[in-house]
Image (cartoon, rainbow, N blue to C red):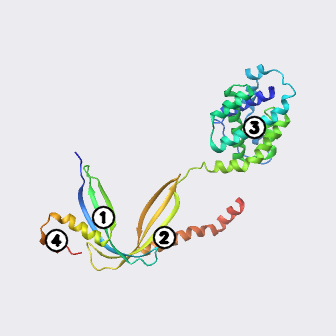
Amino acid sequence: MTSKLKRKANKAGAAERSCALPALPQTQGQKENNLFPLCSKASQNIQSPQVQAAGRAPEKLWNRKAKIVGEFGRIALEFLKKGSNSKIYEGAARKLNVAVDTVQHGVEGLMYLLSESSKLMISEVDFQDSVVVLGFPEELNKLLLQLYLDNQKEIRNILSELAPNLPHYHNLEWRLDVQLASRALRQQIKPTVTFKLHLEQNGEESAKVLQTDPATLLHLIQQLEQALGEMKTTHCRRIVRNIK
Amino acid sequence: MITVGQLVDFQWKLAMAISSDTCRSLNYPYISMTLKVANSSGQITSKSFEMTIPQFQVSVVVWCGLLPRTCLQSLHV
């Protein structure tokens, strides 16, 4: 019981610090820098009244705990994917006989741990070192590591959708016209191209109608092909090679 | 009181749509019009639209409903 509440109390500290923490840059060969900055607040929370009031843990609760941590992990992942649901907090609090706030802090702390470690893409060793600082039993550390490794890719996919979004291409319709007469000039032949550019942003669609003459259109195509051609320069090739 | 904008300019052009991405051989004549309207604060907005030849003929007749018949004859499209 002690360890479970201690874990929840520590995670509460982590969740509270979530807005103020800067992401530490990764440097090779300097493990200390890669550790999660959870240390100072975590040690403060070990002294919290919840922990002191808990008392000694009976041995048979140990088996139950692994399942609970797994359950908490599953809830945290669901919340990362779909957003939080307060009914689940109430149900869990009732089953475990603890306050709803404790459960909420616990889950939020776990969510923060998973999202920050996926964001920084820290290695197994660094993750383990960071979690060891919190003082949990070895089984719990292994469980957390497994949770992190299993879901790292999925969490990264979700986080990648949080980037700012400009309107992007949805569809392009075109039409070739020939102007035969206007108010100012009769009997002329003037070819033009009319476009309807459909754009999409955050689920909203918009359309823009544009018109150009063939010479400008050719120039436009030339500029776009030049932009694509930039991918083939040595500078760009070097960067792409390093990313891959 | 509803304020109505004042027509400042009226431009038209006759064009033929030859082909598009959905139909390679359209051959469809149409009239394109651009109206410039000034609202009560003097701001000019321009609105463009297209219509088929019969639609244009109908609209001409409707707009010129108040003019005497002799004026109508000089407005050949």
User: In the image, is B25 to the left or to the right of A93?
Assistant: left
User: In the image, is A156 to the left or to the right of B32?
Assistant: right
Q: CA distance from mark 1 to mark 4?
A: 21 Å
Please give the residue where the numbered disc 3 appears in the rendered image: A71
Q: Is residue A12 visible?
A: no
The residue drawn where x is 74% and y is 28% is A96
Give the number of the mark in front: 1 or 2.
1
Look at the picture and state if A85 lies above or below A6. Answer: below
The image quadrant of residue A15 is top right
The reply to the same-chain question for discs 1 and 4 is yes
Q: CA distance from mark 3 to mark 2?
A: 56 Å
Look at the picture and state if B60 lies above or below A205. Answer: below
Question: Which callout, 3 or 2, points at the residue further toward the start of the chain?
Answer: 3
| Mark 2 Cα-neighbour bin, 10 Å: few <14, some 14–19, many ≥20 | few
The image quadrant of residue B14 is bottom left
Expressed as whole percent of the image width and height from the top left, the position of residue A173 reads: 47, 68
Secondary element under disc 2, as helix, strand or loop, is helix
User: In the image, is A146 to the left or to the right of A118?
Assistant: right
Q: CA distance from mark 1 to mark 3?
A: 65 Å
